[in-house]
Image: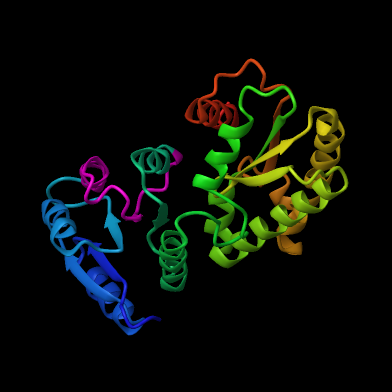
Amino acid sequence: MTDTKSKILIVEDDPDVAEMLTAYFRTQEYDVFTVNWGEDGVRSAHQVNPDLIILDIRLPDIDGYEVARRLRDDRRTTNIPIIFLTEKRDRADRLQGLEIGADDYITKPFDVQELRLRVRNALKRISQGSLTNPVTGLPEGALVDEKLSEVLGESGSALLFVSLLNMDSFREAYGFVASDDVLRAISLMIVNTMREFSRPEDFLGHLSATDFVLVVPPSNLVALTEKLRSRLDQSMEYFYPIKDREQAAKRKDRLFSKLTDIASLKNHPKDVDQIKAELLSIRNR
C-alpha cells in the first residue's frame, strides 16, 4: 500500500455484516466509512469522496439501485467504482445493476477474500485509468474506444466479437480465483490463435470483463473465426473439475463461448457507442 490509504464507503443495513466488513477492510489498510441507509450513502459519497463503494441493494429507505443512479448522475461521484452486495441472484437483477453502472456484483453469503480481490481489482482499474484489464492485462475502456473509433467506416478492418457466457454461474460454483483463471486462459488462447494470422495493427481488447473484441483484416476473418471457435469449444469442459465435467456438459448454465463477426465496417456509422451496443445486443440474443 502507498502512504495514502484508499477510502472505502460501505452502505449496508445489516449491522453484523457492516461491522465485519469495516473491521476486515481496516485490517487491510483501507480507510473505511460505514452507513446503514441509502440516503446517508448518497450524502456520505459527496462528503467523503471515497475511492470505492460497497453497496447493498436491499436498504431500509431507498434501494441500492436508486443510490447508484444518483451517484452516476452526479459529476462528483459518477466515476466512483461501485460493487453491489446483495442476496439477489437472478440474472435480471445483475443486469439491472450493471446497466445502472455498477462495476461488479457479489451475492450473499460471500467469501470475504473474494470481495477483497474484487475491491483490489476495481481500485487497480481506476489507478490505471481503466486502460488495461487487471485479470488479463488486455486493453479496455478508452484504449478500446480509441481503436474502434479509428477503424469504424473502414473497409480494411473486420471485427470478431468473442463472449464467454455463464461466467456468473461458474464463479458462484467454483469461486473468484477459478473464474479469473478461466479468463486468463481464454485470453491466452485468443492471443495465440491471433498470432497465426496476425499483422502489427491487429488488436485485442475487452468490451466487458467477459467480452473480447478483435480487430483483424477481412481476409483473415473466416479462418481465424473457425480455428478459434474450434479451440474454445474443445476447451470449455476442461475448466471444470474432473468430477463435475460430465454433469456440467448437461447444464443449461454451463460455460460456453459465442463468436460473432462483422466482416466489413465500411457501411457502419462512425459511432463507437453504437457499435458496442450492437455487439453486446448480439451476445444477449
Residue 128: percent from left, percent from top? 47, 61
Give the left or right position of residue 177, taking residue 58 as reference.
right
Scheme by which the image is coloured: rainbow
Front residue (pair 237, 2): 2
The question of residue 35 being in magenta is answered with no
Residue range corresponding to the magenta coloring: 64-91
Image height check: is 189 above or below 36?
above
Residue 52: percent from left, percent from top? 31, 62
Front residue (pair 269, 1): 269
Give the left or right position of residue 80, taking residue 232 as reference.
left
Give the left or right position of residue 45, taking residue 181 as reference.
left
Residue at figure coordinates x 21%, y 47% from the top left? 67
Image height check: is 25 above or below 165?
below
Q: Which quadrant does the N terminus fall into?
A: bottom left
Residue 112: percent from left, percent from top? 41, 72
The question of residue 89 being in magenta is answered with yes
Residue at figure coordinates x 11%, y 56% from the top left? 40
Name of the residue lying farthest toward the top: 267
